[in-house]
Image (cartoon, rainbow, N blue to C red):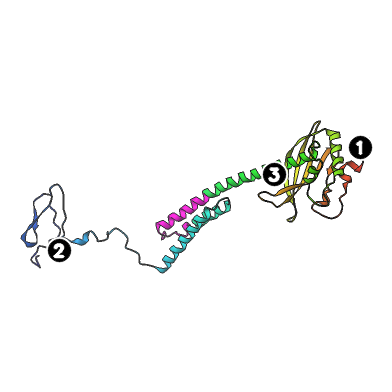
């Protein structure tokens, strides 16, 4: 059919390099040798220029703009960015966990996979960064707490050693300063009686090992209890320490409240106020518990 004087038989394909039929103006088109060439003739004889810009028939058509979908994408993007930011918070394992949960929430809500790929990548990054950050923060926090406990144990050993260090300069003043300030702080006479009795029974002080420890007291007056094993020149004896924690930077300051040595058979040697006076101020403490049954340790049994 030649409606406009031009053959509209459709695309012509020639495997050879000969003529491909008449073109506009009576000319001829040639196809390069060794290949095929498809030409769609237009009414004026020109090739169809829309072939390269025409969308593929196999691809999905573009979705129209939907205000609800755009708002959902914006919310998901903000949530993913918030999860990624929270997951980067250092020294806080719960922050990493929260960041992972925010990223996972974005992925779980996108069951119809309507979110753009960059938003989904942000959510995946939030999950991974939060999980890795949570594990690293937990490791750092554990090491930090172990270092704090180590320093506090060293401080406790130094304070107890000062109590028994009679050869130290200015003793007993440095030993008394290791106790918490207040009316319940033991006096110089109490300290000498306690140290004399302990050294008479077990010999010179060598050190101690902390067997177990725990926290107690009140919010305004926190305490720390420690079960210890005293090492003396002639024997090892069980005992306990009670300490008062005073807020300070970078670590709380620990002060002795009482020292208890338990030789056995229900016998107790105590330096400091009795347990029922722990954390109180005011009345004088009963110092008779510094020796068994309140007797004079210098007296012969």
Label 1 belongs to which residue? 298
Residue contact between numbered discs 1 and 2, judged by CB atoms under 8 Å: no
Label 2 belongs to which residue? 42
Residue found at the very far top of the displayed protein: 234
Answer yes or no: is residue 267 visible. no
Query: Is label 1 in a helix, a strand or a loop?
Result: loop
- Marks 3 and 2, how far apart at CA: 91 Å
- Residue at coordinates 67% horizontally, 51% vertically from top-left? 249
Q: Which numbered dot is residue 152?
A: 3
- Marks 1 and 2, how far apart at CA: 126 Å
Is residue 142 covered in magenta?
no
- Marks 1 and 3, how far apart at CA: 35 Å
What's the magenta region?
Answer: 106-131
- In depth, the one of 136 and 163 nearer the eye is 163
Residue contact between numbered discs 1 and 3, judged by CB atoms under 8 Å: no
Mark 1 vs 3, N-terminal side: 3
Residue contact between numbered discs 3 and 2, judged by CB atoms under 8 Å: no
- Compared with 289, 283 (above or below) is below
Tell whether 39 sits left or right of 265: left
Percent position of residue 175, x then y = 79, 42
* Quarter containing the C terminus: top right
- Which of discs 3 and 2 lies nearer the camera? The answer is 3
- Residue at coordinates 9% horizontally, 65% vertically from top-left? 2
């Amino acid at each position: 059919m030649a409606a406009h004087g031009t053959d509209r038989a459709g695309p012509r394909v020639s495997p050879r390099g000969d003529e491909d039929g008449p073109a506009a103006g009576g000319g001829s088109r040639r196809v390069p040798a060794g290949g095929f060439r498809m030409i769609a003739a237009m009414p004026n004889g020109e090739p169809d220029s829309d072939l390269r810009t025409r969308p593929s028939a196999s691809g999905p058509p573009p979705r129209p703009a939907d205000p609800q979908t755009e708002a959902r994408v914006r919310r998901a993007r903000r949530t993913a960015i918030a999860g990624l930011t929270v997951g980067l918070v250092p020294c806080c394992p719960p922050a990493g966990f929260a960041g992972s949960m925010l990223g996972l929430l974005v992925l779980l809500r996108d069951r119809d996979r309507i979110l753009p790929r960059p938003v989904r990548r942000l959510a995946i990054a939030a999950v991974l960064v939060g999980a890795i950050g949570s594990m690293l923060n937990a490791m750092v926090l554990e090491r930090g707490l172990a270092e704090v406990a180590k320093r506090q144990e060293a401080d406790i050993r130094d304070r107890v050693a000062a109590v028994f260090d009679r050869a130290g300069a200015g003793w007993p003043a440095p030993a008394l300063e290791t106790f918490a300030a207040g009316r319940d702080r033991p006096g110089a006479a109490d300290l000498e009686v306690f140290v004399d009795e302990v050294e008479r029974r077990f010999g010179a002080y060598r050190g101690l090992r902390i067997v177990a420890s725990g926290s107690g007291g009140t919010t305004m007056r926190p305490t720390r209890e420690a079960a210890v094993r005293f090492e003396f020149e002639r024997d090892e004896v069980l005992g306990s320490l009670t300490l008062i924690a005073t807020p300070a930077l970078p670590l709380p300051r620990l002060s002795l409240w009482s020292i208890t040595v338990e030789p056995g058979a229900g016998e107790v040697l105590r330096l400091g106020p009795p347990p029922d006076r722990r954390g109180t101020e005011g009345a004088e403490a009963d110092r008779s518990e510094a020796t068994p049954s309140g007797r004079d340790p210098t007296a012969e049994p």
